Amino acid sequence: MPENPNLLTMLIPYILIFAVFYFILILPQRKRDKKMKEMLAALQVGDQVITIGGMYGKVTTIKDDILTIEVGADKTKLKIARWAVKSVETIKA
C-alpha cells in the first residue's frame, strides 16, 4: 500500500519556486525602486535631467511634485511631473 506523502514534502517545491522568484525578480526590483525614489527625492534646482520621454533639460524650479525644466538652445520652459524624470545627468568637467 502506498503511503500518503505528508504536507511538508508536498510544499517544498512550491517554497523553493517562491524563493527563486523572490531572489531573482522581487528583490532586485525593490532595490531599483528604492534607488529611484532616493534619486527623485534628491533633485535640486540646477540638476541636468533626462525625462522618460527622452528630453534633456535643466531643473529651474521645484514645487511639490512639479518641476520646471529648461530645454533646448532657446531655453523653453516645460512643466513636468517629478515621476517623469528618468535620471540625473552627471556633468563631467
Image (tube, helix red, strand yellow):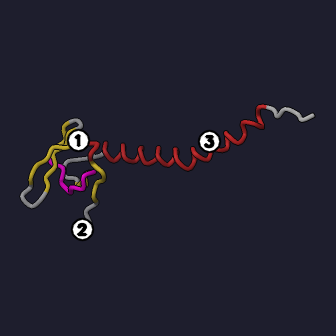
Provide the residue span drawn in magenta. Answer: 52-60
Marking on residue 93:
2
Residue 74: x and y, percent? 6, 58
Which of label 2 and label 3 is nearer to you?
Answer: 3
Instruction: Check disc 2: other Cα within 10 Å, few if <14, some if 14-19, many if 20+.
Output: few
Of callouts 2 and 1, the N-terminal one: 1
Label 2 to label 3: alpha-carbon separation? 47 Å
Regarding mark 3 in the picture, which secondary structure is present there? helix
Three-letter code, disc 1: Ala
In the picture, which quadrant includes the N terminus?
top right
Which of label 2 and label 1 is nearer to you?
Answer: 1
Q: Are marks 2 and 1 in contact (CB under 8 Å)?
A: no
Quarter of image, res 62:
top left
Label 2 to label 1: alpha-carbon separation? 29 Å
Q: Do the residues labelled 1 and 3 touch (CB within 8 Å)?
A: no
Q: What residue is disc 3 on?
A: 18
Instruction: Check disc 3: other Cα within 10 Å, few if <14, some if 14-19, many if 20+.
Output: few
Residue at x 33% of width, y 47% of height: 39
The reply to whether the magenta stretch includes residue 24 is no
Q: What residue is disc 1 on?
A: 81
Residue 19: x and y, percent? 62, 43
Which of label 1 and label 3 is nearer to you?
Answer: 3
Of callouts 2 and 3, the N-terminal one: 3
62 and 85: which is toward the camera: 85
Residue at x 67% of width, y 40% of height: 14
Instruction: Check disc 1: other Cα within 10 Å, few if <14, some if 14-19, many if 20+.
Output: some
Residue 3: x and y, percent? 88, 34
